[in-house]
Image: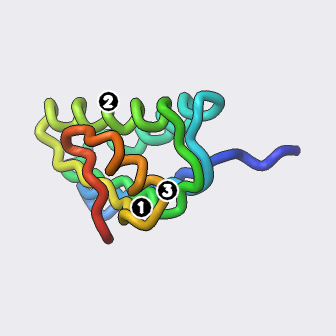
């Protein structure tokens, strides 16, 4: 049995959700990561995605974050991404300059 490329852990604090992603997000597993995220955000008033442990992320991972950001903004849900600039995800977000997805420390 092969270990998954990414793990998605969900912490719920009433209406605040923290989603901790570790490993790799790419074309091969982004749909599974998205399903886990979609399940986690139901009924949330605030969503934080922690990407500190992401070791690799391709354009599909970036797209997943961008779509999530747009959807949550449209629903009036606060959205934060934890991706310090000294991490892979932080560097990717810094380079892409996507609105609402700037790298930040925890």
Is residue 35 visible in the rendered image? The answer is no
Image side of residue 99 versus residue 23, left or right: left
**Which of 35/87 is in front?**
87
Reading the image, the residue beneath label 3 is 88
Q: Residues within 10 Å of mark 3 (few under 14, many from 20)?
A: some
Instruction: Identify the residue shown where x is 43% and y is 41%.
Output: 37
Q: Position of residue 101 (x, y in %)?
A: 26, 46
Q: Which mark is residue 11?
A: 1
For marks 2 and 3, the one nearer the N-term is 2
Reading the image, the residue beneath label 2 is 67
Q: Position of residue 92 (x, y in %)?
A: 42, 47
Is residue 3 visible in the rendered image? The answer is yes
The residue most toward the front is 95
**Mark 2 or mark 3, whichever is nearer to me:** 3
Q: Secondary structure at mark 3?
A: helix
For marks 3 and 1, the one nearer the N-term is 1
The residue most toward the bottom is 106
Image side of residue 4 versus residue 20, left or right: right
The residue most toward the left is 76
Residue contact at pointers 3 and 1, CB within 8 angstroms: no
Image side of residue 7 versus residue 79, left or right: right
**Which of 39/99 is in front?**
99
Q: Residues within 10 Å of mark 2 (few under 14, many from 20)?
A: few
Cα distance between the residues tagged 2 and 1: 21 Å
Instruction: Identify the residue shown where x is 52% and y is 56%.
Output: 9
Q: Position of residue 88 (x, y in %)?
A: 49, 56
Determine whether 64 is above or below 41 in the image: above
Cα distance between the residues tagged 2 and 3: 20 Å
């Amino acid at each position: 049995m092969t270990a998954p490329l990414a793990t998605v852990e969900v912490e719920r604090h009433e209406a605040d959700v923290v989603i901790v992603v570790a490993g790799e997000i790419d074309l091969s597993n982004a749909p599974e990561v998205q399903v886990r995220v979609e399940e986690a955000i139901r009924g949330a008033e605030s969503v934080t995605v922690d990407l500190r442990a992401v070791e690799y992320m391709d354009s599909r991972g970036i797209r997943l974050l961008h779509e999530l950001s747009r959807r949550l903004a449209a629903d009036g849900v606060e959205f934060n991404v934890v991706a310090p600039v000294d991490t892979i995800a932080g560097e990717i977000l810094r380079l892409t300059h996507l609105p609402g997805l700037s790298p930040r420390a925890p």
